[in-house]
Image (cartoon, rainbow, N blue to C red):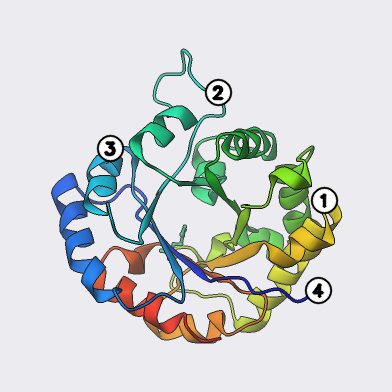
């Protein structure tokens, strides 16, 4: 595959944590800690109720804000959902799609991920599409098949010309919130499988330029070894992103290559 430079991206997935006051306090503490770290893009993914205050607190800083989920329709009678138009109007620039917790607990499927991805791209929201195998699937030797199915499903019918901003996150479900990080070998192999599927589904050029993040028990002390790998282009961080110093250390330690 042709060699291209991919700027690392480090994203904080706060899941359903923090009050508005706590979220603003985080941003105020965090921004000065990363003021000199221009090697990576930094994205915060707060829950929907926090988006307005976090967007406001991060205004005029390099930190970008993502939704954790969105509906694919612009508007409609879909109680409890958030539309891409609403995210855009708030000043949100990125959106997580297909996080494993949404797949596990909220009926997210490869089909809804695909609809959401098409909508995000059409609305100019930078999509971070999450894929990853369950422990049982890994133990049954199905990892490659699962990653190929999820990646191909997400990308089905997508015009490569419209997918230049695509970001994928590999999050092995057995590594999320468990303290078990994928070894660099496991992560590297999975990222190569995903990149090869992007080449098949879209194009070799896009496969080479698409950033693939690793997520699953990323901590300050394992960031450098993971981010040093050629095919790992950043991290999607849960637990260790909730505290400003810890998340700033992850950003700092991602400057490994
Ligand atoms: P942890 O970093 O807490 O394992 O969570 C990973 C994750 O799900 C990020 O989206």
Q: Secondary structure at mark 3?
A: helix
Q: Residue at x 46, y 77 (%)?
A: 39
Coordinates of residue 225 in the picture (x, y in percent): 53, 87
- Which numbered tag is attached to residue 154? none
Q: Which residue position is annotated with label 1?
A: 201
Q: Which residue position is annotated with label 2?
A: 73
- Which numbered tag is attached to residue 2? 4
- Which numbered tag is attached to residue 49? 3
Q: Report whether residue 245 is seen.
A: yes
How much space separates mark 4 and mark 2, taking CA atoms?
36 Å
Query: Which tag, 3 or 2, sits closer to the chain's start?
Result: 3
Q: Is residue 85 left or right of residue 257?
A: left
The vertical placement of 17 against 214, above or below, is above
How much space separates mark 2 and mark 1, taking CA atoms?
24 Å
How much space separates mark 3 and mark 1, taking CA atoms?
35 Å
Coordinates of residue 146 in the picture (x, y in percent): 74, 55
């Amino acid at each position: 595959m042709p060699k291209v430079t991919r700027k690392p991206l480090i994203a904080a997935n706060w899941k359903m944590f923090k009050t508005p006051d706590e979220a603003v306090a985080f941003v105020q503490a965090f921004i000065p800690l990363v003021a000199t770290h221009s090697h990576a893009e930094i994205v915060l993914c707060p829950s929907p109720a926090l988006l307005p205050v976090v967007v406001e607190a991060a205004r005029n800083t390099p930190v970008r804000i993502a939704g954790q989920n969105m509906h694919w329709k612009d508007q409609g009678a879909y109680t409890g959902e958030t539309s891409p138009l609403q995210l855009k109007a708030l000043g949100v620039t990125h959106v997580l799609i297909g996080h494993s917790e949404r797949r596990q607990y909220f009926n997210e499927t490869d089909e809804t991920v695909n609809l959401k991805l098409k909508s995000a791209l059409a609305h100019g929201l930078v999509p971070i599409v999450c894929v990853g195998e369950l422990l049982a699937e890994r133990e049954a030797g199905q990892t490659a098949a699962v990653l190929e199915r999820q990646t191909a499903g997400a990308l089905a019918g997508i015009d490569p010309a419209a997918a230049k901003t695509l970001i994928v996150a590999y999050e092995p479900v057995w590594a999320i919130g468990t303290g078990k990080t994928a070894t660099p070998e496991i992560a590297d192999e999975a990222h190569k499988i995903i990149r090869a599927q992007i080449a098949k589904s879209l194009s070799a050029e896009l496969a080479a330029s698409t950033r693939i993040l690793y997520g699953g028990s990323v901590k300050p002390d394992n960031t450098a070894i993971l981010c040093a790998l050629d095919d790992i282009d950043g991290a999607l961080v849960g637990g260790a992103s909730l505290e400003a110093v810890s998340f700033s250390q992850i950003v700092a330690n991602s400057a490994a290559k």
